[in-house]
Image: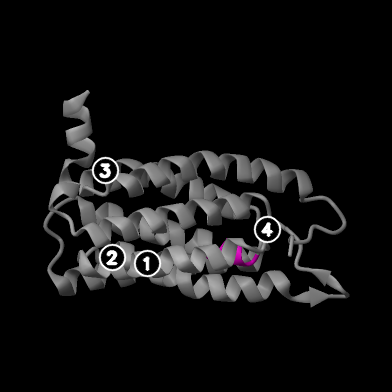
Amino acid sequence: MVDIFELIFGQYATYDSTDVTLEIMAVIFGFLSVWFAKQNNIWVFPTGLISTGIFVYLLFKWELLGDMMINAYYFAMSIYGWYVWTRKTNNTLTPITRTTKQEKRVSLIIFLATLLFVYVVYLYAGKWTSWVPYVDTLTTAIFFVGMWLMARRKIENWSFWIIGDVISVPLYLYKGLSFTSFQYLVFTAIAIFGYQAWKKTLDKPQATASE
């Protein structure tokens, strides 16, 4: 048992205590954000802003460029999503819907453009030294699409979150970020329930956010 604990959390012995505290805070607010997303609640965005803001700082400090870009993008998209979710049409808040053909094309463009962008960033930084950057590039593209679809309140966003979360669990454990790895494990479960919850409300005349 001690050996397992050392394997999972031993790397934190060399970390600054402030950084460990910040990571735990970011994980807690990340949990809250995903939970509010599952509940179709507007608080997904303010809690998400806190979590991603902290992660941007930590990941920049730890030189995890792909992860940092994911969280910087989340931060920006949380502001955009907050606006979209509260925008009213005919006195009705933006409902949960399925992606249109145009949105699917945009999703593909975002995915491919992200792959290219992260590849160039890692190439410029000289980070193509192991298999990790390749997985980082893939998860970054997956999460970019998922966040854009969530901001637009599209039910397909959950499929991208589930795939990306499953990949991220062992990835972050390998990177030595055990708390973050555990976060993505919980995110996977919440994303599954989130899809089921959104699906139930998809066909309702007015699916609005809790304010």
Query: Which labelled disc corresponds to residue 173?
Result: 3
Front residue (pair 136, 113)? 136
Query: Are dots 1 and 4 in contact, CB under 8 Å?
Result: no
Q: Of label 1 and label 4, which has the lower sequence position?
A: 4
Classify 10 Å Cα crowding around label 3: few (below 14), some (14-19), many (20 and above): some
Residue 41, numbered label? 4
Distance of label 3 from label 1 (alpha carbons): 19 Å
Q: Amino acid at mark 2?
A: Leu
Residues at marks 1 and 2 touching, judged by CB atoms closer than 8 Å: yes
Mark before the other along the chain sequence, 4 or 2: 4
User: Which is nearer the eye, 33 or 160?
Assistant: 33
- Residue 91 falls in which quadrant of the image? bottom right
Q: In this figure, which residue is indicated by the disc labeled 2?
A: 58
Quadrant where the C terminus sits is bottom right
* First reached walking from the N terminus: tag 3 or tag 1: 1
- In front of the other: label 3 or label 1? 1
Q: Residues within 10 Å of mark 1 (few under 14, many from 20)?
A: many
| Region rendered in magenta | 148-152
